[in-house]
Structures are given as C-alpha cells and as structure tokens.
Image: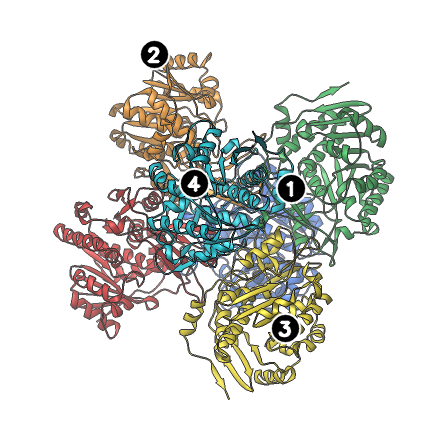
Chain colours: A cyan, B green, C orange, D blue, E yellow, F red
Amino acid sequence: MPSAVSFGETMIRFSTKNFERIEQAREFEVSIGGAESNFAIAFARLGGRSAWISKLTNNPLGRLIVNRIREHGVDVSNVIWTKEYRVGLYFIEFGRKPRGIEVLYDRKNSAFANIQPHEVNWDVLAEYDVFHTTGITVSLSESCRKSVKMGITKAKEFGTKVSFDVNYRAKLWSPEEAFKALDAILKEVDILIVTKEDAKSVLLAEGSYEDIARELYQRYGPEVLVLTLGSEGAMAIKDGRIYRVKPYPIEVVDRIGAGDAFDAGFIYRYLEKQDVKEALEWGIAMAALAHTIPGDPVYIVRDEVKRLIKGREYCEIMR
Amino acid sequence: MPSAVSFGETMIRFSTKNFERIEQAREFEVSIGGAESNFAIAFARLGGRSAWISKLTNNPLGRLIVNRIREHGVDVSNVIWTKEYRVGLYFIEFGRKPRGIEVLYDRKNSAFANIQPHEVNWDVLAEYDVFHTTGITVSLSESCRKSVKMGITKAKEFGTKVSFDVNYRAKLWSPEEAFKALDAILKEVDILIVTKEDAKSVLLAEGSYEDIARELYQRYGPEVLVLTLGSEGAMAIKDGRIYRVKPYPIEVVDRIGAGDAFDAGFIYRYLEKQDVKEALEWGIAMAALAHTIPGDPVYIVRDEVKRLIKGREYCEIMR
Amino acid sequence: MPSAVSFGETMIRFSTKNFERIEQAREFEVSIGGAESNFAIAFARLGGRSAWISKLTNNPLGRLIVNRIREHGVDVSNVIWTKEYRVGLYFIEFGRKPRGIEVLYDRKNSAFANIQPHEVNWDVLAEYDVFHTTGITVSLSESCRKSVKMGITKAKEFGTKVSFDVNYRAKLWSPEEAFKALDAILKEVDILIVTKEDAKSVLLAEGSYEDIARELYQRYGPEVLVLTLGSEGAMAIKDGRIYRVKPYPIEVVDRIGAGDAFDAGFIYRYLEKQDVKEALEWGIAMAALAHTIPGDPVYIVRDEVKRLIKGREYCEIMR
Amino acid sequence: MPSAVSFGETMIRFSTKNFERIEQAREFEVSIGGAESNFAIAFARLGGRSAWISKLTNNPLGRLIVNRIREHGVDVSNVIWTKEYRVGLYFIEFGRKPRGIEVLYDRKNSAFANIQPHEVNWDVLAEYDVFHTTGITVSLSESCRKSVKMGITKAKEFGTKVSFDVNYRAKLWSPEEAFKALDAILKEVDILIVTKEDAKSVLLAEGSYEDIARELYQRYGPEVLVLTLGSEGAMAIKDGRIYRVKPYPIEVVDRIGAGDAFDAGFIYRYLEKQDVKEALEWGIAMAALAHTIPGDPVYIVRDEVKRLIKGREYCEIMR
Amino acid sequence: MPSAVSFGETMIRFSTKNFERIEQAREFEVSIGGAESNFAIAFARLGGRSAWISKLTNNPLGRLIVNRIREHGVDVSNVIWTKEYRVGLYFIEFGRKPRGIEVLYDRKNSAFANIQPHEVNWDVLAEYDVFHTTGITVSLSESCRKSVKMGITKAKEFGTKVSFDVNYRAKLWSPEEAFKALDAILKEVDILIVTKEDAKSVLLAEGSYEDIARELYQRYGPEVLVLTLGSEGAMAIKDGRIYRVKPYPIEVVDRIGAGDAFDAGFIYRYLEKQDVKEALEWGIAMAALAHTIPGDPVYIVRDEVKRLIKGREYCEIMR
Amino acid sequence: MPSAVSFGETMIRFSTKNFERIEQAREFEVSIGGAESNFAIAFARLGGRSAWISKLTNNPLGRLIVNRIREHGVDVSNVIWTKEYRVGLYFIEFGRKPRGIEVLYDRKNSAFANIQPHEVNWDVLAEYDVFHTTGITVSLSESCRKSVKMGITKAKEFGTKVSFDVNYRAKLWSPEEAFKALDAILKEVDILIVTKEDAKSVLLAEGSYEDIARELYQRYGPEVLVLTLGSEGAMAIKDGRIYRVKPYPIEVVDRIGAGDAFDAGFIYRYLEKQDVKEALEWGIAMAALAHTIPGDPVYIVRDEVKRLIKGREYCEIMR
C-alpha cells in the first residue's frame, strides 16, 4: 500500500453561499482547506496510508481542523498542539463571469507559521514512501522554510522520496521571492509538480510545454517532473520520455483543491505501479472529480476513479 | 375531462444540496418520488382527474408521501395502509461533469413490494379512461408483477385503456429479466412508451428510430407507441403513420421525473384531442418544464404548457 | 464627487431558492428591490453622494427597506413616513430554459403609489448634480406621474440635470399608456436611457440601432442618449457623435437590477469625467458585475469596476 | 364519520426564524394560516370528512394555499377562483418575555374579502353535519358578513348545525363593532365557542366563569356553549349542566392555530359521541398538541390524541 | 491511558428541525447514532484510546458513519465491510410538553444485524482494558446475541474487563425477551450499568434504589454496578459500599446519547483512578453536558469535564 | 434630539446555530458586535443622533461591519480606513445549563488595536452631547488607551459629556491591569456605568449595593453613576440621591449586547429628560428587550420601549 506524509498549514475555510459576496453574507459555510491536508485526504481515500504533520492552536477551531482531516483516515498524531498563536482562516466567494473567485486570507501569526524545525517529529518520515509539501508552506515564514529544509534532509536520510508542488500564491509572496526560496529546494526533490503558469513566471522556464518540461527536468534533476496544463491536461517527463494526458470536459462546482487531488492521484498511482502514464491518468481523473465536489476535501473512493478512467481513451506517450 | 389511474410505488426521496455527495451531507432535502405518482400528479395539474393506487406503511413517512401526492389533487383513497413492512427510500446526489447523478435505493421489503393482487380495489379502474403503470412496478417483486397483470386484466374488462412506460432501471433487474417479464405484458398495452435505449437493450429492437418504432408497433400491437429520444425529441406511431417532435433547448435543474411528465402530457392530450401530434407536443413540453423544476413532482399549470408550445413550431408528421 | 438623487418605489423582494417555483416554496429569501434605490445604492458604492426619495408605511417592512438602502451610505432622510397604506411586495422565481424568470407583483395601494407631489421636499434636489427616475415610477399612479413632473420642474429650476430610464414594465401598463405618459416627460430629460426593445415598442423608433438612437436623440433632444442593447452591449449619442461599447461575456446569477447598475455606472462616470465613452464602459462593466451578484443591490466597490475595465479593450467611437 | 364544512379566509403566513424580528429577517418561512382552514385540516386529520369554502386569486400564492390544505384530505372543490384581487398575507415574529408575539396583517383587498354571498355553492352544506365559521370572517367586509348570514340561513334549511368561534381580533375591528355584528349571528348558532376574554370584552358577559357561561348560554340559546379559559382549561354548558376540563402542562413552540385545533377536537368528538365531557377532553388535548407543532396546521393523527387523553384523569362534571 | 473497545450498530440519524414533526419535514439533519459508538467517541474525547467494532454496508451511508466516528479519533479498522444488506436508519422528532420525543427505527436487515460471530477479529480485544457493549446489540438478532457472547468469552480469555449497559429499548423487544437473553450474559459482566426503570421492569429488581443496587450486585456479581437515576443522579456499588452522586440542573437540547456519555465518563475515570466516586462524578458530568449538545456524539474535551466538576460539591459515600 | 458619539472596536461575530458547539459547526451566522457600536445603534434607533468612531481594514469584512452599523442610521463618516492589519473576529456558541456561553476572540493585531490618538478626527466630538466609550477599548492596546485619554481630553474641551461603561472582560486583561488603567480615566467621567461584579472585583468597592454606589460616586465624582445589578435590576446615584429600578422577567434568546442597550437607553433618556429614574427605566427596558433579540444590534423602535415601560410600575427613589 502506497504511503505518504505531508507537511503544511490547514486553515478554517469560510465560504459564502450561492455566489454571494463576502460583504453581503449572513452565513458562512465552515470547512477546512490546506494544500497538504487536501493531498493527505485524497491519498487516504484512494486506499493509501497517509499522515499530515502540522501545528495548531488547541481551541475549537484547531480541533475542528483535525477532526475533518482525521475523518478520512489520515494519521494526525504528529500534529503539534500549542496554546499560543491562532488558527489561520480564509474566506472565499465564488464568482461567475466576469467576476472571478475571490479569496481573502487571514492567516498571519498562525501556529503553523510559528512552527520550529526542531519541534517536529521528523522520524515519522521513515515510515512513509513519500514526503510531500508545497511552495505555500515555504512561503509562510522563515521558520517554515527552515522546517521544509529539515524535512527534506531527514527524508533523504530515510530514503523517503520528496515530492513537491510549486503551488505559487501571489497573495503570499512575489515571484522573485518564490524563486529565490524554491530554487535550492527543488534540487532536492524527487517528484516535482508545477503548473505551466508557475513554470514560466516563477521558475522562468520558456518555450513550448515540452521545452519547459525538459528545461526544468534538467535544471532540477527530479526522478519525475509533472507540468500541469489546466484545461489542456497534464504532461510528465521521466527518463527523458515525455507523457501527456488530455483533460476531461468538466463543469466546475468548486475548483479549490483540484491541484492537490491531482498530486494525490498522480503520486499514489506512481508509487503503486511505477507507471508514469497511469499516474497521469489518475492525477487528471482526480482533478476532474475534485472540480465537481464542494469543499477542499475530495469525497471520492478508489472505484470511482477507476470507473471514470475506464470510460475514456488512454494518455499518449510522446517520443 | 381526461382521467387516469396509476399503480406503483412511491418512495421518500432524500437529496443532497449544492452538488454535495451523500457521504458529505449534513442535511437532506426530503421529498417524494415514484414514476406512477409523478404521472398522476402531472396529469392532475394539467386539469385531468387522476388517482394513484399503492400500498404504504402507516407511519409518518407513509403519510408524508400521501400528503404530498394529495396536495396536487390526486385521489389517494385507494391506497392500502398496513402496519407492516417499511416505506421505500431513495437517496440522490446530483453531479456535474464528469461526475454523474448518483441514486442509492433503499426500498427492499417495502409495503408496496409486498402488495398482493387481491387486496387492491381494482373496481375503481372502471371510473378512469386509462390505467397507467411502468416496468419499475413489474420489477419490484413477484406479487407486484402479478398485481400488474391483474390490473391489466381488470382494465380490459372495464374498457379502460392500458398505458405502460417500459422505464427500465438497471439497479432493479437485468435486461434479460426485464424482457422476460415485460414481453407478455406489453402485448396487452394500448399506449406503449419506451425510450430508445430501452427499446434497444431491453426490447431488442434494431435499426433506425423509425425501424424500431415500426418493429415494436408490430410486435406488441398497441393503439399508439411512443419512442422517446432524449435530446433528439420523441417519435410516435399510430395507424402506421409516424409522428416526430423536436426537443426544447433545456438547462437542467433536476431531470428526475421528466419522463413521467412526458407520459402525463402525452396521455392527457391524447385522451383530450385524439391527436398524436398534439399529444407529442404536450409530452415534450411537459418533459422540458420538468427538467427545470426541483423535485419529482412537476409544479406547472396547464396554461404554462400551452404558452410554451405556442412559442415554437409544431411537430412534423412523417409519411 | 458626483452626486445624484433618485425618486421611486422600493418593494420587499421575496425570492425562491434553487430554481424552486413560488408555488412549491417553503422559504423565501427576503431582500429589497426598486429601480431607483438600486441606482442610488450603486451610485454611492462607486464613491458618489446619493439620496433616495420615497414614501413608505412605517412598519417593520418599511423600516427593513430603508435599512438596506441606508446600509450602502445612501441618504434616506427625505423618505416620507406614513401610518397608512401598505409596503409594496414582489415575488420572484428564477427559471432555466425553457422556463423563464417569473415575477409576481403585489404592490397595489402601496404608500408610494399614494405619494402626493406637494409632500415631497423637492428643495433637496438643489444639492445634487442629477435627479434620476424611471418609467416605473410614472406608471404607478396619477399622483406618481404628477410627482415626477413636479420633480423635473424643480430640478430644472435648480439647474440639476434630469436623468430618466424608460424601464417599461408590461405588468404595469400597456406600451400605448406608457408612450402617452412618457412622451412629454422625455422632452425635459438631460440624460435619457432606454433599451432597444422599449425604444421600438414603446417609443416607436425604427431602423438600425444607430437610426433609433439618432431618431430619439432628435425627437427628445437630451444632452446624451443611451440605447442599451442587451447581449450586444450599449450605444450612446451626444453632440451628434455615436459611441458604442461591447458587452462582457457573462454567466448570470441574478439579472434583476443590472439595468439600474448600468445607469449608475454611466451617470457616475459621465458626471465625473464628462466622457461618454468612459461612461459607457463604466455602465457596461457595472451591468456585467450586477448579473453575477444575488439580489437587487450590487455589492461592488469602485476598484473592482476599474480592474474589470482595465482587463479589456476600450469602446469604439463611431463617426 | 363526523363531517364539517368551514368558511373563511386563509392567508400566506410568513414567519421569521429563531425569534428574529421581521425588520431583521433575511428569510421567511412560508406556510399558510386561517382559522377556518386550520379547523378543517384538524377535523380531517382526526378522521372526519371536511371541506373548506373560500375565494382565492388564481396565482402561485393562491394555489400554494389550496395545496397545503388539500394535502390533509380537506375537500377544496368549492373554493372560488378569480383572476382579480390579491392573496392575503400575514407576517409573524415570535417573541420571548418581555417581548410578545407580533403579527402584521397585509390582507386588505383580498379575493376573500370581496366574496359575494351568491357566488358560493351553499348547496354543499347539505352534505355535512356542521357548518363552521368564526368572527374573523364576519369582520373582513360587509360582503363577508352577508355571506356568513346566507351560509347560516342555508345551513338551517338543510338541518346542518352551525358552529361559530367568536375569535375576536383587535387588529380587525373594535369590540363594539364586533358586538354589533355578532350579536344577531350568535342567536342562530348551535355550537358556540368563545374565549373568556372575548366573552367579557366583546360579548360583555360578567362574573365568574360559570356566570359567564350561563349568561351567554341563556342569551344566545345554543345547543352547547364552550368557554375556553387559556391556561385554566375549558368549560362547556349544555342542557343546563356545566362541564370543565383542566389544561395540560405545555411548553409552547407555536401557539397560532391552537384555538382552531380545540374547535376541531371538540366538534369532532361531540358529533361522534354526543358527549360534552369527551368533546372537551378532545378539544383541550388537540389544543395542547397544537401548541407544540410549528405552523398553523396541526400535524397529528387520531391515535395520538387518544394516547394523550388516556394518560391523564378525566374532566369533571359540575352539578 | 485508559482504553476501551465497543461493539454495536450505528445508524444514520435523521432529525427534524425546530420541533417539526417527521410528517411535515422538508429537510432532515443527517448525523449518526449508536450507543456503542457514542461511547467510543466520548471515551476518546476524554483522552482515552478507543475502538469500535461493527459491520456496515460499503456505500456512501456506511462510509458517512465511519467518517463521523473516526473524526473523533476512534479506531475503526476492525469494522467489517460488506456489499450486502443495508445501513440502519433512525428518524427522530423532538417534542415539547405534552408531546414527547418520537423515534422511528428503520434498521431491519442491516449489515450489523447479520454479523456472524466468527467474522469479527476478536483478537483486538486483547489490546484494550475494557470491552463494552449494550442490551441493544443483544436484541438485534440471534447472530448478534451470539457475537456478544463470543466477544465476552474472548474478553475473559484476554483479561479484558467486560462492561455492559442494559439499555432496554421497548421498540426492539419485550421485557421478557430481554430478561431471558440478558440474564446469562450479565453474570459475565465486570462493569454493569442499568437505569432504575430497566432494573425494575426488565431485571425485576424491587425496593428502594439501594435495595435494587444490592440485589443486582449480588445476583450478577460484577466488580462494580451502576444504577442511573435520571433526574435523581446516579448510584454505584462496589465491595459492598454504595456511592451516590447528585444530578446537575440541566436544560435539555438533545438527550439522545446522554446515557452513553455517562458510561464513557464513568468507565474512563474508573479505569484511570480506580475510584468509584470520581467515576460517578465524571459520568454524571458527561451526561449533563451531553444533554446540551445537539446530536449523538458529545463534542466536549476533558478540561471541560474537569472544570464542570470543580464547580460543585462532591458525591457522597453512603455507609 | 439627544446625540452621542462612541469610540471602540467592532468585530465580525460568528455564531453557531441551535446550541451547536464551535467544534461541530458546519455553518456560522455572520453578524457584527462591539460594545460601542451596539450603543450607537441602540441610541440611533431610539431616535437620537449618533456616530461611531473606529478604525478598520478596508476589505469585505471591514465594509460589512460599517454597512451593518450604518443600516441603523449611525454616522460612520469618521471611521478610519486602512489597507493594513486585519479585522477582529469573535466566535460565539450559546450553551444551556450546565454548559455556559462560550466566546472565542480572534482580535489580535486588528486595525483598531493599532489606532493612533492623532489620526482620529476628535473635532467631531464637539457636535455631540456625549462621548461614550468602555473599558474594552482601553484594554486593547497602549495606543487605544492613549486614544481614549485624548478623546476624553477633547470632549472636556468641547463641553461634551464623557460616558464610560467599565465593561471588564477577563479574556482581555486581569482585574489588576484593568484597575490600574481605568482608575485615572474614571475620574474624568461624567456618566459612569459599572456592573456590581466589576465594581467589586475590578474597582474594589465593597459592601451593600448602596455602599458600593456611594463609594464609587465619591471616589470618581461623576455627575451620575449607575450600578447595574443583573437579575436584580439597576441602581443609580446622582446628587446624593439613590434611584433603583426592578428588572423585567425575561426569557433569554441572546444576552450579548444587553448591557450596551442599557447604556443607550439610560443615556438617551437622561439627556432627553434629565431625569435619573426615567433614564433607569429606559435602560432596564432596553436591556430586557435586547435579551430577546438575536444578534448584538437591538432591533427595536422607540415606541416599543415606551409601550413596555407603560405596562409596569415605575422605579423607586430611595432616600
């Protein structure tokens, strides 16, 4: 059974209903969201063993977060509890054209942003196939950045693969800051996932999608690199071969968390079958389903992914 | 005033909100659903006189079902009440692409599935123009199948026309079981309605839509046969002439019950005007409206159907 | 800072949820709606100074209306309160194809319909750049019509510009009645706004959009005339020059109030910059955003309009 | 099976949630309410045969009212439909001490207030044991008052008993107006029901409860007179004997409709058993249950009333 | 850290809102309920280690149940999943005086009722201090009864204490059936909990509370016996000494699950401190808090229990 | 017309529904709360002229706060807007016995806590009869404390009375800190309001209520001092005379904001009539009504207060 442990912050998510704006809301739906816990949840739901490492203030909001992650079978026993700081929040309003989706972060001074590298029980990484984190975690604070580095170092020691999704967020840092912080980290990564937009604007790769993939693959030297292409599907490169998968036609209910579901699908299947094209298929299927499910966590089961994939042609291998 | 009596099971319908999955629901909307009561409701709302015959456990859930059918003016005085068995339930979650609509039946051992042919007051059929039922009713149990047969026999005695919608449901029986049970029944039917999919996979008709219609018309010898074509409209055959009607452009809110609304529109107008093309127009207009209304029962009034039909070109008569 | 005062009726708005029909509703959402207060709200939100003049029964429903207008910073100190009459109501159900949006008015005998020209404090018009009202107000009663006329006369005295949106409503009067009442009024108008449909069916203008604009411009002699073109954008004419703006691609959440948002955007920017093309851009951007926001009042801020406009090409000036 | 037909207006009922004030509401719960339909519903639910005569505007609100009465098995085939006038509305907010329950009527110019005596199909009264109406109906308009009188005259002709609940409402008329209109009517009544408050302030009876009962019994000469005593239970007088029943300890959820439920319980059992003390027991039990059920209609079944009565001591017969 | 494993059925719980009756519901709140999982949840929330053994149909309803138990940190890895049978359901409406709380079970033919003794992984009992189950489990089927017996046998082998709450439910079996099935089982129990009502009507103990406690203590010979006294608190007997604890003044929000919370509080503290009076205090405090929290699972944390207990006098030890 | 300007922080208020705990919430109701804006709202609703001075981050949450204060007619034109910091939040869950109401503040680093004395437009104080603030404002930060001092100094200059409610909050500071900060401030206050609890534990007054009132009156020398007594009513002292008012019997819906409503009622009437006993009556009536209305803002109108007071005996003057 594939296994993965992720590291990052999860926030309370407040969303308005029926396309209401935050300013006019009388009620918020209360759920949770965080790229790394979304990943761990999706990974567990596919049948994998997963854990999530984080730090939270021990109050009802912090407990709510842990409950809703644990609900899916994710191991949360390495969450660090504190009486200090606060629980990060984010507010979301869904728009329709020409009004976009709007996110308002209120996550400053959270417990996680104050996590210290040495307070984490990194030894647990030895029990998992993959250690997964994202650029969001790196961006949150200096101590978060150091913690990611220590995590990667420990993973290497244990022979645990490092997977990393660049996940650039303009509300958290500038492309220049991101590049500066991530460039060194990415060289340590085994499974590297990046959107085409981030590849260009943050990692400064250029050319066709294939050019970009090859450039980053050479620059950072991961075992496998995935370039996600939004409505054009996804592409991966391993051992010099390029794989490409088409997207599903989708009608969007809630796009938040779709990238994390992709990561889970890809990594889960990659670990299970060591097959890049199957992994891409699982990633893109997970992302498609995640777009149709309200909330960050992706309420699916393994059979639904298989059924969806069965109904369509397989991805192509180029070259 | 056209009149019709229907026979079948109605369940409590639990639906999730806002495309939530059943597994994540915190609330279910509670309504009712059953092909034959949907038909009776739609028929009454168009201005017809209608009744619904069924069997229900006498508890709050059973009473809820009867209330919500009676609300529309359907005569429910021939429902058989029992203290035994249970009330059938179904759960529904609406999906968006690529996730489909999902239905979970929990209807085993319901009062209706245990109905006995001799406990029904079949004499009431003499007071109606049409006796309507569907393949769902036949599938539920041996005693349901026998009850349908007795109902048809009685209808014939009284000179009441028999209308039947094949309504195949893969969650209830296999195509082979369905064919075996329905083949004999369909020979007794005056107004036969079937989807193109069921015509092919259950009734094993082949060829163009017209071929299929002609084949089934000859095989079962109904007064009129309707082949519904989904997004391509509908077709009917009577006295060797084929009629075809185009669909409306629709945006779907809730597709459940649209077929039953078609049946009610078609049969109501067919009885009222003895005009197949008008009947097809009413059927397709009812189905279109039903797609836009939440819940199984179709909250429309006769004038709305007329107004809708007025706004577009009439159906064609082929040959 | 541009300033405007509007005059008209605002009703309680009851809307069903999730495309339910009024007949099946168990809950109504309670908000407010009225073309002139929608205008005043949108105007204030853009950064202007605005007021709304009306008459209301002093009960919880009347106070609810004033609260929700005042919330946006509109001056309501000239609302006339009475113990008599009633608060106007309207019910709305949203449809999807082929079922349309349905509005049920219950506004007869409202306090506003009984407003008398001399009870209004018209002197306040002197403090605003523009006096805005619509054809709806004219249609409500003889005393409303007289009040509009007195308002226009006073505005002229004070040098306050008169703006008027024809806003024909078939549920309130016939095109002939409307034409008869409006023809004289429109000759006094400085900023005249009319949809292409009303221009044809009520004002009886003919030919191409440009022909229509020129005809009405000559017939009524306003400073500027705007012809709104629905999904084709909008057109304006001033000093013989014609300006045209393209629409935004939109996905509709709630179209009620979009025309009023257009008026506010156009007039606000026209007053601010004396630039017809910019005014059209602001009008069309406001209308686009209003389509995506539930309820009549348009919860936007000035920066969002600017950001939206920035993202697309500018309107063309023809000739 | 006891049978009864009632005559009166039913309105749409808008209620706020969770003790909110009307002025702060964002949602209203939508149900129906009217003393006479509440009576007919409760009567039908106990197992009786009942009908409701009224007049309604044929729009979604009017149909909503009829649906929700018909749901319980009440015959609504004698409702008069019109395209004119409007549907009466009322708004309700529940208070807690020291803030009381607040009702806001918006029922002027309703279809029912414009009912004409000769448009009612009074012949249907011949088919029922009892013709029931209340002082509310009398208060609504001159034509309502005349209609009540004609109904009573017809009932007398057919040998149908007349039952009447004084049901004084201070928001509809003054005690003096009520007395003037009701005094003549009450002399024709067979079953007369009045609260202790109305007995004193409207009917001007004085003294102890027993004095009041005896005085009204002599003044109006009904077959049976019931004096309801609120938290002290109820009292009845027939053939000179006085009966008294204690109240149940109750916790109030929604007190609206409790008096109507009393009437239905009392009259139903009185017709069934000709036993005043049993009738009082059923009345008081129905009223107690009605206090615990949200909304005007009382969702109970006959067995629940019997079970409740069984659990406590019987009423006393005095003298 | 105290540890406990429980064995029983958990159902989906549908509850109406705001004291609505089931028959009038338009929405149900969806949660879960089952005495043994309520116990395991409460035990885990206090800081203990707990597991829940059961059998469920693998569909969205079954997964919903497991998710909501796992959310609290209960180990669900020994739940047996099947494709057969169904998920048990129950419907609840809350009443107010004189209308009681109403429960409607729809749990026949559930997966759990079809559990077979040999399919359970009983070895896991060895890892826990206590094996807990209730009379409800015994009542569900013959195979459930056998499974309980096998579980008890295994627990004895492993030196795991057996705790048992009689939990008689009149809707599931008669007192005679219950006595017949439970009498043998209770002799094997180490921690026996029973309400005063069940002690009398099912176990046929008589006399004062103390008499009853002593009689059952002697008859069944448990290590400790608890007699819960509802609004009079609770009593326990161990080593011949009787302990008694007073109740808290409570205002009830939702009483379902309060008994299970008592069990968890009592057993948790009893294991932790081997102190009967402290255990009683924890039990009664947990029960009091559970009465104020909507839903079966008791959302509390250990500190809240301690804080509550601190604020009042300690229980008395009699003799 | 009495007039008042208040100074303090207002937060977004998230409340759970139906006594749910924060940890189990799926939805929060979104409103606002802050002692000083509650005061300004209540003051305006009584018919006074009021303003609220504060500092807010200019985002949808900040605008939501201003809208909901402005809705009631409070002047918000002196709110300071910033792009920095955050909007304060608080979470509330209502309990029932023995579980108390629980408040979770998340207000650190709010814009208001960072307000600087010199950025406030204090000149506006000259236009109001009273400048009102509370101990909460003083507690929030050093710069808040300095701002309060500057405000008081300015008020004194302008001849504007200073009113101050001690409003001690244990979650914000210790009694010692509070005393230290407030002791000097209170000497400048004209209208001083304090609860009996705060009088004892923070201000360290002792003895009977009258002793306490006299001691504080002498120590701080205000024009009038009010001692609120919770369920025992309230007491005031002016010119050596003591006034006392009894409480109303109340059933609590939402107690938050009741103290602020008291302040508004007392001060409004005190300014209007210079009559301490009438002022006490208005204060206690406002507090009683506020207990029955969900949310911080008190949706009442002046007439309701007068009607409530009329229905009961007047307060006593002692000595």
Visible residue check, residue D175: no
Residue kind at label 4, given as amino acid type: Asn
Proximity of marks 3 and 4: CB atoms separated by less than 8 Å: no
Q: CA distance from mark 2 to mark 4?
A: 53 Å
Q: How many marks?
A: 4
Proximity of marks 2 and 3: CB atoms separated by less than 8 Å: no
Between D107 and F291, the one lying in front of the other is F291
Numbered tag placed on residue B296 in the rendering: 1
**Residue at left offset 51%, top offset 43%:** A263
Query: What is the crowding at mark 4: few (fewer than 14 residues within 10 Å), some, or many (at least 20)?
Result: some
| Residue at the far bottom in the pictured view | E319
Query: What is the crowding at mark 1: few (fewer than 14 residues within 10 Å), some, or many (at least 20)?
Result: many
| Chain containing the residue with disc 1 | B
Between E45 and E304, the one lying in front of the other is E45
* Position in image of residue A283 (x %, y %): 55, 40
2 and 1 marks on the same chain: no
Q: Quadrant of the C terminus of chain A?
A: top right
Q: Quadrant of residue B209?
A: top right
| Chain containing the residue with disc 3 | E
* Position in image of residue F116 (x %, y %): 20, 49
User: Which residue is disc 4 drawn over?
Assistant: A167
Secondary structure beneath dot 1 equals loop
Proximity of marks 3 and 1: CB atoms separated by less than 8 Å: no
Secondary structure beneath dot 3 equals helix
3 and 1 marks on the same chain: no
| Chain containing the residue with disc 2 | C
Q: CA distance from mark 3 to mark 4?
A: 51 Å
User: Which residue is disc 2 drawn over?
Assistant: C240
User: Which residue is disc 3 drawn over?
Assistant: E155
